[in-house]
Amino acid sequence: MAGNNVQIDINNVSKSYPMGAFKVDALKGVDLKISKGELWVVLGPSGSGKTTLLNLIGGIDSASSGRITVGAIEITSLNERDLNQYRRENIGFIFQFFNLIPTLTAGENIELAAELVDKPRDIMAVLSDVGLHDRAGHFPSELSGGEQQRVAIARALAKDPPILLCDEPTGDLDFETGKHILTLIRTINRESEKTVIIVTHNTAIGEIADKLLRLRSGQIVEMKDNPSPIDPDELRW
Amino acid sequence: MKTLRKKLFRDLFANKWLFIAVTIVIFLGVALFGSSFMAFLNLQNSYDYSYEKLGFADFTTKVTSSPPDTVKELERLPGVKAVTGRLNTDIGLSLPQKGGQSLIATAISLPQNSRPQVNDLKIESGDYLSSNDKYGLLLEKSFAEYHNLKPGDSILLDGTAGEIEFITSGIVTSPEYIFPAKSKNEFFASPATWGVIFFSDEVMSELTGNNNINEFCVLVDEDADVDSVIGLFENELAPFGVVEVVTSDEQPSNAGLKMDLQEFGEMAEIFPVLFLFVGAMTTFILLSRIIQRQRNQLGLMRAIGYSRRQVLWHYLSFALVIGIIGSVAGIIAGYLLAESITDLYIGMLGLPYKITGFHWMAMEEGVIIGLLPCLIAGIFPALAASRLRPAAAMRTPPPATGRKPLIEKIFPFVERLSLLWKIPLRNIFRNRRRSLSTILGIVFGTVLILASAGFLDSIDSLFSLQFDQIQKYDARLSFAQPVSQETASAVLDWDGVNEAAPILELPASLEHGNMSFSTLVMGIPPETDLYGLYTPDGNKEALAEGHILLAVAIKEKLGVEPGGPVTVVSPYYKAAFTVDGFVRQPMGSFGYITLEDAQQLVGSQAVISGILLGMDGSAIPGLRNTASQNLDAVAVEITDEIESQMMDLMELIDVIMWIMLGFGVILALMVVFTMITISLVERRREIATMRTLGEGSGRIAAMVTIENLILGIVGLVIGIPLGYAVAVYLMRLVQTDMFSFDLIFYSRTYLLTAGIMIVVMLVSELPGILDLNRLDLAKVTKEQVS
């Protein structure tokens, strides 16, 4: 289900950063328009710039040049404080390694995000959405990888952001668990009309996307619509 | 942000041993500050109250002799609040309860039926003098306690008309003898041979055959200038021969107490500063490493919308928790310790009044000085954390550029060493800040241990110098009034006396140019070995006619060099001498001339004021009896007894120094434990990788130990000279006219310090090494690099 109105407008964006003794050009002149409610999958090998693209949209990294507009906000011109406010209200992150705080329980990890907004979603309701209503009091070390990722998704949903950014969400999970996580993300995208961008090097996952983007060496090499995305359950890799 | 608070406390709990270690360092620093500062305030308040309550004189003018009526004239002078005139003289007494043991007392006259307005007494037991008991007397408390004398006990005093029996009316404390110092030059006088007694002026006249007085104790008006009033007194009393003016600051007991107070005050500053600096340093390192380990978490916090300020506050809170717990616990412990120190100190000195209380300001200061270093130490890593961009924080940092460490460039053979040595060496250079922190921990621990141990060695050496080299006599006879030199020959006939050296001590002022210094000048026979005079280099000095030897401390007071002239001045004599050199003298600062020169100063009379005795050990116990049977008004001082009393007096300093030494060990233990644990936690992944490759845990423990020992040796190499320098500095602070001793370190102290530090290092690394042996290799090798 593709939206018609452009929600994310990326205009000639480049990004380079130092890596040890070297300078890495992570993105080179990328142009992209993403509409509300779309599910995008960004594919590419390691070092292609896909995570950098995600970080720039999420406002956790700044572009070296170019312009990114999300809704009515040009985030490339925001100062630190406004950028923080933007992340707080608009973005939910899901990471490959879950990035849960090990000293907080599942419920508290979600609460950590919920406390940041005026009208957060009910923590138990969010945990129920991801099928973990009975695991609220468990610490990350007491949860399986799939459960940890579901807590991370619940944490992203707790603020009820319009955009979900998922960086290799299945990268650290086994095949079956990975499919369940993708199903969950797809369901959230469909039911709550949140814009979802999944970054992965797993080309099979591209089949669930509304739009597919391929990056190589910081440049877009392919961008196409997928008129008939398949159900994540049908995926094979 | 209650979830962040939960995270804070759980992170603290997860790293509890590290946080406890750092908190203990802050706790010790604040406890040290609190206890010494609050004890200082308690003591100061107690002194002030005692002095005010008993009307401690602002100054005392001593004259040769003056009629008692002069007091009325002096009371009319501007700025004078009250004047008490009295006769102060040495008098011989004997104690019937102790088989007639004779000794010398400072006798002070008092009004018969009224209390003196200046230098009043606190009656500890019994009653004040009354007209019903003409021959009643009051005994100073420390003297009475030493001889177990109580009200009602009789004492025989030597009068011009023979012995008179007095009955003890009461036991008292005097503001002039809170610390029972006989004079500036005889600061440590033994109650075995000397005491202070008070009786009525009427009886004093009868006993001494002297109706006049020789001291005026003065209280000045609050708004009056003491120096101006002293000037008026000197003018008014000039016809009566002003001998000396002693201000309250110079009064021996008060000066001694103030010196002690000053030491407390300085202790309150120096040692806590050391602890708090180390506390700040370890807090900084600990927090920096925690932030480094939590880069992902703080990246996440920033990514989901936590502001820089929230992140800053969160990480600063770690330092705040350390600071608050350490400071509050420290100040409570400090308060309790201060109470004990005050009790111990006041009990030891017998201070008339004890004033203790809550010193809110000191407590607030304690909390602030505990918190401040933590805040300063915490703000930098916390600021750095808040400034990290979220994406950068979550990105795995690139490995540091590999290069040969400096040591391998300087010593190429290092490259050929086995991995057992090469890995620890490279680790040292790999994370220089971490290595530097461990070294600093060792350095500060060494400084504290060495500085405290240096004091203990110096005190020990002081006793050895004073009693093995200077006071080589076994006993000393002192006379209330000068006696003929022939007495010394007579004493030689006593049982067990092998040598008898007559001496003549003269109170005098030494003058050089426009500088002067009041002290005792001792006339000693040049040929005697019973009194040793040694230069700071340890060479024996001999006395020569027309020449004077001065205690080292006088050198600076007079600004005189060997070969320079010094004039010995008193109301009765004046003579010029050439300075021959300077001699070591830990207690007091005297001038030394030949006995013959001293006798010439008093009109070429063959008189002496004391005799130094070399004796058979078996004859010493009977010496007092022999002396009282054969001589009048004589005090017998047994050197072993004086040494033992001195040791008792030094006990407090000894205890403090042992506590400091203990604190030094704890400090080193906490710092080294923190650094080593952090270091091992950070290297868990690489150590786990080595283990998975088949490296034995024993070999890994050996690598860790080698690394720590190398750092320890570097720390010791820096810490030992620094500890020496700190000890020199501290020693300078406690040097006074009355008390000066050299800084001595025994070789065993250096070895012991090094040994303690190495044991501290080995003990500190134990928990970390045990933890490494329990590593879940599969899990740890998958952990993200931080």
Image (cartoon, helix red, strand yellow):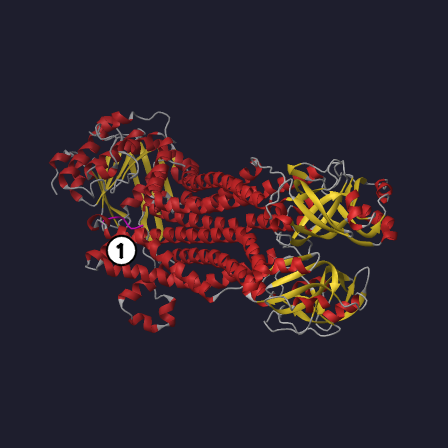
Which residue in the protein does label 1 denote? B686
Determine whether B291 is above or below B734 in the image. Answer: above
Query: Magenta stretch: residue B738 in it?
Result: no
Percent coordinates x, y for residue A75 in the rendering: 38, 38
Q: Nearer the viewer, residue B429 or A162?
A: B429
Which quarter of the rendering shows the N terminus of chain B? top left
Determine whether B566 is above or below A47 in the image. Answer: below
Q: Nearer the viewer, residue B482 or A24?
A: B482
Determine whether B387 is above or below B304 in the image. Answer: below
Determine whether B558 is above or below A184 in the image. Answer: below
The type of residue carrying mark 1 is: Glu
For the stretch drawn in magenta, the main secondary structure is loop
Q: Left or right of A236: which side holds B477? A: right
Q: In this rendering, does residue B336 appear at all?
A: yes
Name which residue lies at 32% across and 62% down.
B706
Q: Which residues are magenta?
A: B782-786
Percent coordinates x, y for residue B14 in the rendering: 32, 42
Query: Magenta stretch: residue B785 in it?
Result: yes
Q: Left or right of A193: which side holds B760? A: right
Of all chains, the one bearing label 1 is B
Q: In this rendering, does residue B560 appear at all?
A: no
Mark 1 Cα-neighbour bin, 10 Å: few <14, some 14–19, many ≥20: some
Quarter of the image for residue B586 reads bottom right
